[in-house]
Amino acid sequence: MKVEKKKKIIKTIKVDVDKCNGCRACEVICSAFHSTPKYSGNNPARSRIRVIHEPIKDIYVPVFAGEYTAAECMGRDKYVIDGKEYEECAFCKASCPSRDIFKEPDSALPLKCDMCESDPPLSEPMCVQWCINDALTYEEREEEVEEEVEQEDLDIGLESLANKYGLDKIMDTIARMSESKKG
Amino acid sequence: MRYAETGFNLEVDLTRGNIERVATDPGLTELHLGGLGTNAKILWDRVLPEVEPFSADNLLIFSAGLLVGTPAPGCNRTIVSTISPQTLLMAFSMMGGFWAPELKYAGYDKVILRGKSPNLVYLWINNDKVEIRDASHLHGKGAVETAELIRQELKEPKAQVAAIGLAGENRVYMASIEHGRSSASRLGIGAVMGDKGLKAIAVRGTKDINLAQPAEFIKLCNEVLQYIPVRDKNPVPGVMAILAGLGSPKEMTVHDEKWHTENFSWGNARQRRKDFWNEEIEKKWTESMENVRTRLISCYNCPMKCGAIISVPGISTYAMKCFSKLTYTMAAFSDLDFGFRIAQRATEYGVDAFSTPQVMAFALELYENGILTDKDLPGMPSDSEGRFYWLLDRIVRREGIGDVLANGTYWAAKQIGKGAEAYAHNNIKKHEQLPLKLSMLNPVYFLMYCTGEKSNITQIEGNFPQAPFPTMEERKEFVKDWIQVPDEKFKQYLLDWEPRGEHSIPYYPTVQMSCEIVDWQEKMHYIDDALGVCAGLSSFPLKPPYHIHNFPALISSATGIDMDEDRLTQIAKRNRTLVRAVNVRRGLRRADEKPPEDHWKKRFPELETKLLDAYYKFKGWNNQGIPTKESLQELSLDYVSEDFLRRGILTDEEEVNREG
């Protein structure tokens, strides 16, 4: 099989916790940007970035919403950095049952940062634009990824499905799915 | 749908334990906006002049400003209003932080408290669920400590808490309401909270705030936000560092305290130390601050860093902002290290950092002059720092002499007698002022000190420079991009203002110009206080991002209310007049409107009379400072003039007399 190399843009928000003044402007503008119609409302509880902060302990960590997870971790570790003790959750991006952030407050549906994807694209995600203290900065880098890797994953996945349901059934299903897509 | 505001107030009767969610009249938003404006309306309607501050009928109102909770940068103020136990007039202390936005997200614009709880309680507002909870276990706890204990007990780390310390519980007239890095400190509102048996209000909200014209509004917010770093990179030249930039005076970043330590008075607002500042002190004080300041912090949705987390080794961490850094230091003739240490205890006790050090310095001055003796101060240590701690502990507990001092210098002097009154020399309307003692009368400041309804200079001064620039080049440079002026004529006033000669103080700015300058500066504060915009981005600094020309569009795009500069000016005037009306009905008259006798060395009684006469007239008030029937009608405040006529505060004849 021919290995295809593909260019991919990796979007990165760099978080400098030392520069955070705890103002939560990132939460404000994130929730405003993602409301419908755009900016029509704002509510930090709907934000896809939250500042985990404990002022008295000097802990200020802006965290972005990542994947939803159905189960909470079995254990929770602690990190001591520069003499300050952080709960593991302070760095975790998951929308998870152990906490109330990264969930819509009324429906509890999980929220996920989409880097403010929009058409036309923004120069930077809104939280970065509104963090004029530069605790949040935006970087893009290009990476070459090999398509083959994904192909292998697909092979493994399909093979396990074929083992479970039989190859015929899988083929039928795929045929039906592609038919309905066309229709 | 209501825009920018929630349209609901919480009415809490602490006597009966009753809580109601009450829809508000959108018509009042059009007339008063919100915040201080609607607070004044409520106090006018519901707290009659006979009501004593420590009466169940006095109201304590916590209000968010109209634009709080929207994305408008720096719009986060809580406006607390009640009747002050110290001045017996309307108090409207304010605080930044995170409390007011959280209240809006919980679905309320105001919390209106009446009655008195028989036991110490706290209020827990969690969206639609509101409960009065027992706080007997929080008796005597520090304000910062209380906030933490409540968050733990509720298992709500995101709850925002406003709490009183021991001073509030004991109804000390300098008691503050503390909230993280912020506090509503002036005029004893913490004492009213304590009198009501309310230790704290915790709030948590997860609802939306809506905007009427989102695209327009966010464009204006972006302009404000983008201007802030530009302004920061271009400090105003020729003014002292703390006035060159935006924000509240940057006391947490500035190390050079030459200006404050040599121009403000030490002790009981007595002694200027003109050659105090030197390299050695600068080095020591810089070290003191660097050693304890762990982070510069801001309020909700604001890029500024006016506050700081302070961790003095060996004592618990707290947050500080602004000038409390120096008030204890200077009152005690001590150093910055002491200032940071005692401010920690004072913050937990919950006391006003302007009045409290002055009260203690006043007590020590009475002691030095034999008016208070060892009998009154049994066991007081001999060193200045030790005495300050000793006095502070007694004041907040109302123990011994502390019970007298807890009422502030004005009332304490009256009670002590023996000539003590002469030592309570730095008050306006019974309220302790900044320890500034200057030489030549400044006509603009004279009017602001006399008539400022809050009796606090920082709440009325701001957009016009405090002093003339020495050279014409500097003046031309300053007015070049001075877009914030409401009228071009103010540029000319500044261009013509000289440090010496014919065009200098006290006769220039002229009487008319002084009236206009004061009116402009005050107007901007009243707009901020209705909207909940921090003065640090608006009415306080020179060339701020918010001003009379962008406010109307911000208000109309947020709320959907039609707004232009004239209408906004009229609303600010209405709110300002209504606050005055509340106070006039409580007895405020011209005789009360004067700066401390010794504020300036060079006084000009004739000019001062002219200034006050002209300013009253300019404001639409009669010669006693009472708003006239005509001006009240013009502001749709007919109900005030009717009340004044009924009470004999205004008479029809008086109106006729004024014509002649």
Image: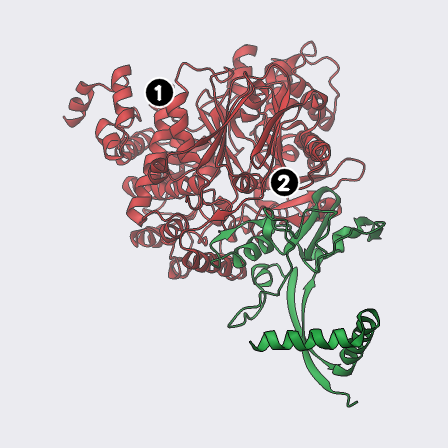
Chain colours: A green, B red
* Left or right, residue B429 beside residue B339: left
The quarter of the rendered structure image containing the N terminus of chain B is: top left
Give the quadrant of residue A10. bottom right
Seen from the viewer's position, the closer of residues A35 and B239 is A35
Of residues B83 and B590, the one drawn nearer to the viewer in this rendering: B83
Three-letter code, disc 1: Arg
Q: Mark 2 and mark 1 in contact (Cβ < 8 Å)? A: no
- The residue that appears at 32% across and 35% down in the rendered structure is B574
The quarter of the picture where residue B130 lies is top right
Labels 1 and 2: the sequence-earlier one: 2
Give coordinates of residue B609: x percent, y percent.
30, 29
For disc 1, the neighbor class at 10 Å (few under 14, some 14 to 19, many from 20) is: many
Residue B309: quadrant of the picture: top right
Q: Is label 2 in a helix, a strand or a loop?
A: loop
Cα distance in 3D space between marks 1 and 2 = 35 Å
Q: Is residue A92 above or below residue A141?
A: above
| Residue highlighted by disc 2 | B181
In the rendered structure, the answer to whether residue B291 lies left or right of residue B650 reads: right
Chain hosting mark 1: B
Circle on res. B585? 1
Up-down relation of residue B450 to residue B563 (above or below) = above
Q: Is residue B76 above or below residue A37?
A: above
